[in-house]
Image (cartoon, grey):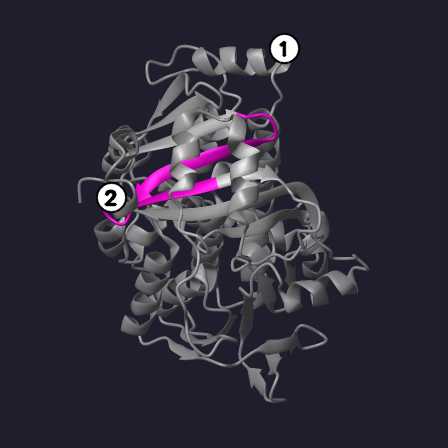
Amino acid sequence: MEHIKHDLEWNLKAETPLRIIIVGAGIAGLVAAIGLKRSGHDIVILEQVSKFVEVGAGIQMAPNATRILGRFGLLDKILEKANLLEKNSMRRYADNYELGTAPLMPQIAVIYGAPLGVLHRADLQRILLEGAKAENVKIRFDARVVEADPDFEARVKLNSGEWIEGDVVIAADGIKSDIRRQMADIHSVHDQSMPTGDAAYRIIIPKEKLEHDPEALALLESNNGMRWMGPGGHVMAYPIKNNTVYNMVLIHPQQPGLENEESWTTQGDKREMLDFYSQWNDLVKRLISYVPEGEIMEWTLNIHRPLPSWIENKVALIGDACHPMLPYVAQGAAQAIEDAAVLAVCLTLTPHVRVALAIYTLVRKSRGEAIQQSASTTKTALHLPDGPEQEKRDEAIRNARGKEGRGGRNPDLWADREWQDFMWGVDVMRETVERWEEWKERVDGCALEAVGASIVA
């Protein structure tokens, strides 16, 4: 495949197959299941819903994610559904003036050995679910896990009262994770989300709503990302579903009275959306006017304090259960996929569960939390009010380092070449395999009980 370099084929088989319980069949849980099953482990996923329904909108698959999905045999299916963005255009909110562009495909694939694409979250979920079924992963629906073993042995309790036992538990139960809260409690950490003051509208506009507007239709038919920046908010937009739907995420100040509930299914108010963006350029205003009534989703953007540990005994957290991401650098799914991949490597290279989980923590925790923090940093840069700081930001974007290697840092970290090298260029599977003996020595030098806290520091 022209967009990916298979420089680390995934053909490792487990030294000792393990019985692995995965809590949650979201992106993190399904990728973990596929990777672990391909390595020879026995997997059961416990999913609380009775069936999947299509939710969400567009989602980005960055090179650090597609590299892993390629190794797990999923990339061809992803690329059938994905739009490969050619560039990202960074613009002023009021007059639509282009401050700069960040080249994407195919240059990104050449640099990082894997493509960058965008697709609908429901298409990604479907591909992963089909991939898990193709690997004969057992999925139990309508099986809500209410607690892990009090000593974090490898067993969990369902809401029916049934206990499920295995060799290791992977908690991929999302931002509202019950197991996360259970882990936080033993460290006397009050695990509560805190509002950032921002909320997001997610909207998708079908092609037929744009056909009478040549400028809007041109956006849909191009494979370009658009990033409009303004006081207190920004808009990220791009085509999905083979250029038949235009996807927009509109970040804005949280409205008074909006619940701090972390949900994809809260309906937003179109009038409030139009009011906030009333001073933005005509193209943005026209685009949001085309959204069908009743099809605006809104959710608050909350942050979670980092946990002291992502692991306890034979239980590990992955994905949003341990590092829920704000959307400003589009790494939520990618970081969940990295977690899943590293766990697949660790549990395959050693049969010692606690050693494997300790190494997983070493490889993933500091990196995941650094990228989590970078989203908050990027928010500040994108939402500056008009004035001297905004003018400095705009000048920095105009003079940012491009593909020729000249220029300075881009305050929009998603478009910054140095931060792209860190986000997209690091190959966590390769690092885990090639530095395995080093990781083992570090774990052997510490008491395993301290791995979750002191060894990471």
Residue that appears at 67% across and 72% down: 152
The answer to whether residue 438 shows anywhere in this view is no
Front residue of this view, candidates 49 and 340: 49
Q: Is residue 96 above or below residue 351?
A: above
Q: Position of residue 16 (x, y in %)?
A: 43, 72
Q: Secondary structure at mark 2?
A: loop
Q: Secondary structure at mark 1?
A: helix
Asked if residue 206 lies left or right of residue 449, the reply is left
Q: Position of residue 284 (x, y in %)?
A: 42, 31
Residue that appears at 55% across and 27% down: 382
Does the magenta segment cover residue 235? Answer: yes
Q: Is residue 143 above or below residue 331?
A: below
Quarter occupied by residue 55 = bottom left
Badge 1: residue crowd in 10 Å (few <14, some 14–19, many ≥20)? few
Q: Which mark is residue 239?
A: none
Residue that appears at 36% across and 75% down: 137
Asked if residue 51 lies left or right of residue 386, the reply is left
Query: Amino acid type of disc 2?
Result: Asn
Quadrant of the snapshot with the N terminus: top left
Number of dots carrying numbers: 2
Secondary structure predominantly adopted by residues drawn in magenta: strand
Q: Which mark is residue 388?
A: 1
Front residue of this view, candidates 54 and 371: 54
Q: Which residue is mark 2?
A: 243
The answer to whether residue 229 shows anywhere in this view is yes
Badge 2: residue crowd in 10 Å (few <14, some 14–19, many ≥20)? some
Does the magenta segment cover residue 44? Answer: no
Q: CA distance from mark 2 to mark 1?
A: 38 Å
> Which region is colored magenta?
230-249
